[in-house]
Amino acid sequence: MDMQRTFLDRLFESGLLIDTGVEGLYGRSGQFEDVISAFERLIDRFGGADGAEAIRFPPGMNRAYFEKSGYMKSFPQLAGTVHSFCGCELDHVSLLKCMEEGGDWTGEQKATDIVLTPAACYPLYPTVAKRGALPANGGLYDLQSYCFRHEPSNDPARQQLFRMREHVRMGTQADVTEFRQLWMERGVKMMAEVGLEVTIDIANDPFFGRAGKMLANNQRDQNLKFELLIPITSTTNPTACMSFNYHQDAFGLKWGLTFEDGSTAHTACVGFGLERIALALFHHHGLDVNDWPEKVRSALWT
Ligand code: ATP
Ligand code: ZN
């Protein structure tokens, strides 16, 4: 805990991260952003020739899609919804009065059609499903989005609004498992190029509640999720900086992702936690990029 505080304090002092008064919600300096841009170019160097279709969604998604995704069943504790004032002039008067008296004015806010995106790939599945049947060779997509997760923490690597860069593959079981394997190998090579030592381990998502434990065990037993771990704020608990998820045909069935012959597509996604990778680089090579090893600098900036 203490070590985490120290690294966060140093990040604030150096100006790389900017305190907003809320745990896990930070401004970022130009230098921090420059590292993220450079790392994203490295991702393109490794994966650009695959010809993925680039799509960028805003950090909010259609609430109806979110509801259908089942996110509230699995991760209600992490979700963020967007609410707004939808009242009349009289309601406005009582709102201002309540705020002035220091009361809880948020109770009257009404849910809008938008929720905060929990993972970059969530808006993709319904979007692709709407296009109709997938071609025989499936699909490959390149996404990046700010994502929200309600997990306030003073660990700078656990933020509430952070960016995920993802590649998503839809296809046959063989297509998507091969894709996931390829990115696990690429992930290790990429991190070696920027001087970061990693381990890859089996993982599970933080499913909610007692029923969630079973889902998490099931996910592990079936090798559905792997993470690439780098020590940042703790060496005993290294941080997941990439994840490699195989959804089997679960999203294919849910969203109706099918081939022309009617069979259901399998899907997999690989996600880079961009802030976590930048933090790993600052933690290992120092808070001033000018002092980073030449090998790392040239991997990122040439
Ligand atoms: P964790 O187990 O650490 O909570 P996760 O397994 O839930 O992470 P994923 O859902 O797989 O994470 O998200 C994809 C990637 O996004 C992760 O590999 C990680 O790099 C990044 N990420 C996830 N949660 C956060 C967060 N709170 N702050 C910063 N990055 C995050
Ligand atoms: Zn994903």
Image (cartoon, helix red, strand yellow):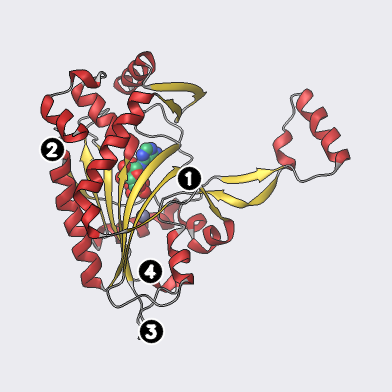
Disc 4 crowd, CA 10 A, few/some/many (<14, 14-19, 20+): some
Compared to residue 91, the image places residue 55 above or below, namely: below
Badge 3 marks a residue whose secondary structure is loop
Badge 1 marks a residue whose secondary structure is loop
Find disc 1 in the rendering and name its residue.
Answer: 78
Kindly report the distance in space between the C-alpha atoms of the residues bearing marks 1 and 4: 21 Å
Of labels 1 and 2, earlier in sequence is 1
Q: Is mark 3 within 8 Å of ligand 2?
A: no
Q: Which circle, 2 or 3, is nearer the viewer?
A: 2
Question: Which kind of residue does numbered mark 3 sit on?
Answer: Gly
Question: Which kind of residue does numbered mark 4 sit on?
Answer: Ala
Kindly report the distance in space between the C-alpha atoms of the residues bearing marks 2 and 4: 35 Å
Kindly report the distance in space between the C-alpha atoms of the residues bearing marks 1 and 3: 35 Å
Kindly report the distance in space between the C-alpha atoms of the residues bearing marks 2 and 3: 43 Å
Taking the spot 52% from the left edge, 58% from the top edge, the residue there is 66
Rendering quadrant holding ligand 1: top left
Kindly report the distance in space between the C-alpha atoms of the residues bearing marks 4 and 3: 15 Å
| Rendered image: mark on residue 209 | none
Compared to residue 219, the image places residue 82 above or below, namely: above
Question: Which kind of residue does numbered mark 1 sit on?
Answer: Leu
Question: Which kind of residue does numbered mark 2 sit on?
Answer: Glu
